[in-house]
Image (cartoon, helix red, strand yellow):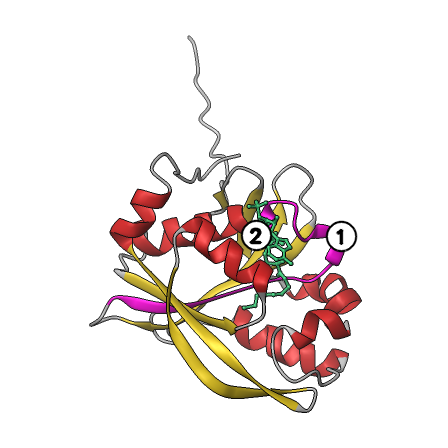
Amino acid sequence: MLMFIYQEVLQPIMYYGEFTCLRAVESSDIDEVLKHWNDLNFRRLLGPPIPWSRRYLETWLEKRINTDPWKDKMIELAITNKATGEFLGFIHLEDIKRPHSRAEFGISIQNPENQSKGYGTDAMRVILWVAFNILGLHSVYLDTMEDNERAIHTYEKVGFKRVGILRETEFIDGAYKGLLVMDILRDEFEKANPTFKIRMTP
Ligand SMILES: CC(C)(COP(=O)(O)OP(=O)(O)OC[C@H]1O[C@@H](n2cnc3c(N)ncnc32)[C@H](O)[C@@H]1OP(=O)(O)O)[C@@H](O)C(=O)NCCC(=O)NCCS
């Protein structure tokens, strides 16, 4: 008599794009993050460059690891290289507002060697697809330093539109800078990325 053995294969939830894979953030990511987190050129793009200790970064990471998308209104994921599994950075949706179906978006790829290689664009398409097709959101917005040309170019590439500038609102290295606010609606994302779809398996 033939016996069939069904073996259940564990399939962790991960979102695969063309070059990147988004997975849950883990405490073990800390060493990789610390390598570049205090880099001046990187941190200037995010806000006032203040050094973070390992403990502080661990606390920040732990808070984000422990979030519930609905209760804490945020989801933070690690961006990894789809081919090698290398940790590349963080990507998140926060301030998720259920009645309005909107959220704020943020991304950082820390190691300069991993920037401008197409990972950011791909990871953004993945999280926006998740935002609109898994979380059921209607719009996503962000803000960025008005002179962060690479980020602005990348955001426009995936379909974000310029909304306006909060003038002289960030004090960085002794001078005030404006923050450019951008947003994207679900149908605009689909129009800008008509064939894009994530995979849940490699
Ligand atoms: C912004 C960021 C997420 C973009 O991700 P990335 O992987 O570097 O971006 P990509 O390689 O997918 O695309 C970069 C695009 O910007 C272009 N670019 C690079 N430097 C540029 C510059 N100085 N000015 C304008 N465009 C620039 C690239 O040519 C590319 O566009 P193309 O594909 O049309 O040629 C990433 O660089 C990053 O995390 N930077 C540091 C932190 C940061 O700025 N975060 C955003 C804060 S709001």
Give, as a single range, the part of the protein colored magenta: 101-119
> Element at badge 1?
helix
Amino acid residing under circle 1: Glu
Separation (CA) of disc 2 from disc 1? 13 Å
Question: Which of the pair 23/192 is nearer the observer?
Answer: 192
**Can residue 38 be seen at all in this image of the molecule?**
no
Residue 102 x %, y %: 29, 67
Residue occupying the point 39% across, 52% down: 159
Residue 65 x %, y %: 54, 69
Residue occupying the point 43% across, 10% down: 2
Ligand 1 contact, mark 2 (Cβ < 8 Å):
yes
> Element at badge 2?
helix
Drawn side of residue 157 relative to residue 42, left or right: left
Say few, some or many: other residues with alpha carbon within 10 Å of mark 1 (under 14 / 14 to 19 / 20 or more).
few
Q: Verify CB contact (< 8 Å) between mark 2 and mark 1.
A: no
Drawn side of residue 75 relative to residue 88, left or right: left
Q: Quadrant of residue 176?
A: bottom right
Which mark, by number, is residue 120? 2
Residue occupying the point 35% across, 44% down: 192
**Vertical relation: 33 (above or below) 3:** below
Amino acid residing under circle 2: Gly
Residue 170 x %, y %: 55, 86
Q: Read off the residue under disc 1.
A: 113
Question: Which of the pair 33/140 is nearer the observer?
Answer: 140
